[in-house]
């Protein structure tokens, strides 16, 4: 049987080709004719009207089961017919009679019924059923009218078949505003807001004038993609065609401006409306609530009550949302009273909103009371309570509540799972999180965006980067939160390289990064120490107008600091309006770690002036700076602050204090703090052992080492550096060998370069160069620079020219730019009077462009550091020289003779004496003696090794002045007291 369809071309579309098969091959469906035309939404039904020969209208319902291979001719048609008396009878008519009745059906009524059924299929998104109805229309040869065209467009649009919907529109003889609106609504309903806006523009180009529904839909699309600029153009269009005061258009405009943050414009549109109904009030109240303006939402609600517009539970829910977002407990309780007064207290929807209010106001107990007052919990109330517990840090209780929910008939939804996964993340139990992931698969929410985002965050926070990436890759349409959660895991040293790649890919996908994106990618830059990429990210931050954001600014400061670019870091720091303790700590620690301790201390003082309270990390960073420049008085002030603020018990602070006092020459104070602490960790033990070793207290270092082992602590590599150094300073050769061998045989450690250098120092300091040579060959240390530097220093002390030349040659092979190699070698030649060789080495030093580091010493007097160099200027230099002359006269009376043989210059003896008298440590000592500082101990710090003459000079001055003098040179501390030194002249 063939049908003529006129000039319609839509039937040639590929999706409808099956309708043109021979009738014996078309899959038909059994027909049952009920007594009315109602369609059960649970069954796939299409309605086909028939007219009998008596012109009595009969309605029949066609049920569409799964297609079978049964021929149409073999199928029986059961028809239930309603007669005028209201009784019914069943009969099986002949097919011929059925077809005759079929032909006489009124085409307009058929199209009306088809349109109605297509609308039902559109609501249920039943694509196959709708296409079957379309097929009936084609098979019966009914020419479509405008209503049917529009119904088809609406049906295909809402079922997600936008291509077919657009082709149907193109085939329409006359495209009117209704059909265009149906197509635009379909696109917008599926979330394709940009395409919806594009269709609106095309419609206007075609000269079709929009109606109120078209404008409202387009405004909705603008609000979905936050395109306030185009929304304002539509606003103008509404004014031009006199639709501004339409209720649909007005509501859509209010919603648009509210979602785009233009609350003032939303208010103006609202109050310009001639009539404000409940819908408009709800939209505006909800808008203020969404942006956290709880007071504004509550004020609008009060105005709504005055205008005598009836409110609904949706109104109350919006007001409660505003109270929750602004954490306004007073207004929230007032609305709660109104909920009770209106008899809606037990409504699950409002109870969930009230739970959210009390949750955001930190009243978990009140939220739980509300929850348990609900008699019939639904998924909304369960989800709200679980979210409440999770947000307030009660992750364990949230997990327990989810367990209770599972034992009810209520099934969790995507919001429930998002909260439970978040709770699992904070709970720190990966196994539990994985079991929730399995549960998500079971309930079919594995592809939900919010659930996937929570899962990505969970896996990334637990360090399971690959699992988080798998969840991300399985997502159909990841959003910005998905990308941000993925980036948040790429900050450790194993995965940080993936951060820039992911960031580039995200930009290529068209996503605009936000604050959280930049914080995560800057952390990746910090881990990579990639300053070039970091600066590119900084440019993106400025491009996205986030340069003033304090969180992004803090991340920038941290990135530049980790990359040791302190100038850029300070510029980013200075631009911050609000600087919290973390930002100050990053800057202070950065200065301390880049050998800019003075700036670290200065910044710490500025931080206190601005009223920011330091935490344990701030104090630790500043103490580290004090240790570097031996700022004892500043360190003592920090010690006092730590006691006042209760930070002394913190392990980081206490370790930094012990280290500061040890490096500032106050080993007794360091030991006092160490013994006063209740608990010790390996860092504290190492700090104390190394401190004793540095001060020449080898016996105390070994005692501390034994006490550490007695308390059950195992030594590490740092421990053995301290122990071997102690053995070297005391000349304990056999003891040093024993501890060195125990590293491998007892503790299973592989010695590092520092340990080999310490062992070489033990042997070479004692003059055992043959053993040193055997040790170097046996351990294959010929390419170890630190070992040869140690040997060269020992050769200088013992005047071993042959071995010293060999050590220098090895060092020249490894690095020709180290000034100490040239200086030590020339000193060896000078001690032997080989001045020609001295001249050659010094000429070689100049030709290589290597600059000799000048010797300098510094002393802290009245919280101010004074630096001295040989031949340098100082405001009190004349008084200093007078004091040195006075000391020289007194010392000559007790037998002091300047050791001019240590002046390694080819000059007269008088010049050599003058040269000795200008050594920087002597200048610092004289200044300390003439100052008004009444402290018993004088602490002097020198950047090079102290010479023998100055060492002897300090011993005698300590005796005649009855002052303890502490000198720290590049290797160790010397405590001069009553004419002797703690090193016992073995240095």
Image (cartoon, rainbow, N blue to C red):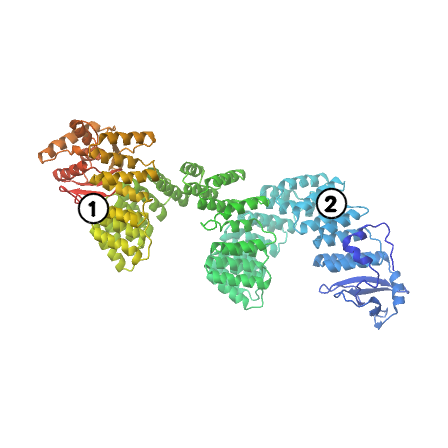
Position of residue 42 measured from the top left corner of the image (x, y, whole percent):
71, 65
Position of residue 298 measured from the top left corner of the image (x, y, whole percent):
55, 50
Find residue 703 and report its image quarter: bottom left
**Marker disc for residue 148:** none
Q: How far apart are marks 1 and 2 (CA)?
A: 101 Å
**Compared with residue 374, is residue 697 higher up or lower down, i.e. above or below?**
above
For label 2, the residue is 211
| Towards the viewer: 419 or 388 | 419
From the image, which quarter does the N terminus lie in? bottom right
For label 1, the residue is 766
| Towards the viewer: 775 or 557 | 775
1 and 2 marks in contact (CB < 8 Å): no
Secondary structure of residue under mark 1: loop
Q: Is 356 situated left or right of 188 in this image?
A: left
Secondary structure of residue under mark 2: loop
| Total residue callouts | 2
Q: Is 444 situated left or right of 772 in this image?
A: right
Position of residue 406 measured from the top left corner of the image (x, y, whole percent):
54, 67
Mark 1 Cα shell of 10 Å, populated few (<14), some (14-19), many (≥20): some
**Compared with residue 312, is residue 820 higher up or lower down, i.e. above or below?**
above
Find residue 72 and report its image quarter: bottom right
| Towards the viewer: 557 or 693 | 693
List the single residue furthest toward the right: 53
């Amino acid at each position: 049987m063939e049908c003529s369809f006129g000039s319609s071309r839509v039937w040639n579309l590929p999706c409808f080709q099956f309708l043109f098969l021979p009738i014996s091959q078309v899959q038909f469906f059994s027909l049952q004719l009920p007594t009315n035309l109602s369609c059960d939404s649970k069954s796939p039904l299409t309605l086909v009207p028939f007219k009998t020969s008596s012109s009595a209208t009969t309605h029949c319902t066609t049920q569409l089961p799964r297609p079978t291979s049964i021929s149409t001719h073999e199928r029986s048609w059961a028809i239930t017919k309603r007669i005028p008396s209201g009784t019914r009878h069943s009969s099986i008519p002949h097919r011929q009679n059925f077809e005759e009745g079929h032909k006489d059906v009124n085409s307009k009524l058929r199209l009306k019924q088809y349109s109605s059924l297509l609308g039902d299929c559109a609501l249920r998104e039943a694509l196959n059923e709708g296409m079957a109805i379309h097929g009936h229309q084609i098979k019966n040869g009914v020419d479509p009218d405008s209503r049917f065209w529009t119904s088809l467009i609406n049906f295909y649009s809402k079922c997600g078949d936008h291509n077919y919907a657009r082709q149907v529109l193109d085939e329409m003889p006359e495209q009117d505003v209704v059909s265009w609106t149906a197509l635009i609504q379909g696109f917008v309903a599926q979330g394709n807001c940009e395409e919806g806006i594009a269709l609106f523009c095309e419609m206007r180009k075609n000269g079709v004038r929009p109606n109120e529904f078209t404008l409202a839909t387009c405004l909705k699309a603008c609000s979905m993609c936050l395109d306030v600029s185009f929304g304002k153009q539509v606003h103008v269009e509404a004014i031009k065609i006199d639709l501004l005061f339409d209720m649909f258009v007005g509501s859509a405009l209010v919603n648009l401006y509210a979602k785009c943050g233009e609350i003032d414009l939303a208010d103006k549109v609202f109050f310009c409306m001639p009539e404000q109904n409940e819908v408009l009030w709800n939209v505006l109240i909800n808008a203020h609530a969404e942006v956290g303006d709880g007071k504004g939402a509550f004020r609008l609600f009060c105005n709504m009550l005055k205008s005598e517009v009836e409110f609904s539970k949706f109104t109350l829910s919006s007001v409660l949302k505003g109270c929750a977002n602004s954490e306004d407990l007073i207004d929230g309780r007032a609305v709660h009273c109104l909920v009770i007064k209106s008899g809606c207290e037990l409504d699950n929807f409002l109870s969930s909103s009230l739970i959210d209010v009390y949750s955001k106001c930190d009243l978990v107990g009140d939220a739980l009371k509300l929850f348990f007052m609900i008699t019939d919990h639904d998924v909304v109330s369960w989800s709200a309570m679980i979210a409440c517990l999770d947000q307030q840090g009660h992750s364990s209780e949230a997990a327990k509540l989810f367990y209770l929910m599972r034992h009810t008939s209520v099934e969790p939804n995507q919001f429930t799972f998002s909260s439970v996964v978040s709770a699992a993340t904070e709970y720190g139990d990966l196994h539990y999180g994985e079991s929730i992931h399995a549960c998500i698969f079971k309930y079919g929410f594995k592809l939900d965006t919010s659930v996937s985002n929570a899962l990505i965050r969970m896996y990334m926070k637990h360090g399971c980067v690959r699992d988080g990436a798998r969840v991300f890759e399985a997502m159909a349409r990841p959003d910005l939160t998905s990308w941000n959660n993925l980036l948040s895991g790429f900050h450790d040293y194993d995965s940080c390289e993936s951060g820039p790649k992911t960031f580039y890919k995200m930009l290529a996908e068209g996503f605009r990064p936000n604050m959280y994106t930049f914080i995560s990618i800057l952390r990746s830059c910090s881990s990579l120490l990639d300053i070039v990429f970091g600066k590119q990210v900084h440019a993106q931050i400025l491009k996205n107008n986030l340069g003033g954001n304090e969180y992004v600014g803090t991340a920038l400061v941290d990135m530049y600091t980790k990359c040791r670019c302190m100038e850029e870091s300070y510029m980013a720091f200075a631009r911050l309006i609000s600087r919290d303790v973390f930002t100050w700590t990053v800057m202070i620690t950065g200065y301390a770690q880049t050998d800019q301790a003075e700036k670290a201390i200065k910044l710490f003082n500025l931080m206190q002036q601005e009223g920011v309270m330091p935490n344990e990390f701030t104090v630790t960073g500043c103490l580290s700076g004090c240790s570097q420049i031996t700022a004892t008085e500043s360190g003592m002030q920090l010690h006092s602050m730590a006691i006042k603020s209760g930070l002394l018990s913190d392990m980081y602070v206490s370790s930094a204090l012990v280290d500061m006092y040890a490096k500032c020459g106050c080993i007794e104070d360091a030991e006092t703090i160490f013994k006063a602490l209740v608990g010790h960790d390996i860092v504290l033990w190492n700090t104390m052992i190394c401190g004793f070793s540095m001060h020449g207290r080898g016996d105390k270092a070994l005692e501390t080492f034994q006490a550490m082992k007695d308390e059950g602590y195992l030594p590490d590599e740092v421990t053995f550096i301290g122990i071997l150094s102690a053995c070297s300073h005391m000349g304990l050769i056999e003891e040093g060998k024993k501890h060195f061998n125990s590293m491998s045989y007892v503790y299973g450690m592989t010695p590092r370069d520092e340990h080999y250098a310490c062992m070489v120092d033990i042997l070479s300091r004692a003059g055992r160069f043959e053993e040193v040579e055997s040790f170097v060959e046996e351990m294959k240390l010929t390419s170890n620079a630190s070992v040869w530097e140690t040997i060269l220093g020992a050769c200088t002390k013992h005047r071993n020219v042959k071995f010293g030349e060999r050590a220098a040659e090895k060092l020249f092979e490894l690095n020709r730019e180290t000034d100490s190699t040239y200086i030590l070698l020339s000193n060896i030649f000078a001690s032997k009077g080989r001045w020609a060789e001295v001249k050659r080495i010094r000429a070689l030093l100049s030709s290589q462009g290597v600059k000799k580091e000048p010797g300098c010493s510094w002393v802290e007097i009245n919280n101010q550091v004074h630096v001295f160099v040989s031949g340098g200027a100082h405001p009190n230099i004349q008084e200093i020289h007078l004091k040195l002359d006075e000391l020289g006269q007194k010392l000559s009376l007790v037998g002091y003779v300047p050791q001019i043989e240590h002046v390694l210059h080819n000059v007269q003896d008088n010049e050599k004496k003058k040269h000795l008298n200008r050594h920087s440590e002597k200048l610092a000592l004289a200044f300390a003696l003439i100052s008004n500082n009444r402290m018993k101990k004088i602490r002097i710090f020198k950047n090079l090794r102290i010479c023998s003459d100055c060492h002897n000079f300090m011993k005698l001055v300590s005796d005649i002045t009855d002052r303890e003098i502490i000198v720290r040179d590049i290797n160790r501390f010397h405590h001069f007291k009553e004419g002797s030194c703690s090193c016992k002249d073995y240095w």
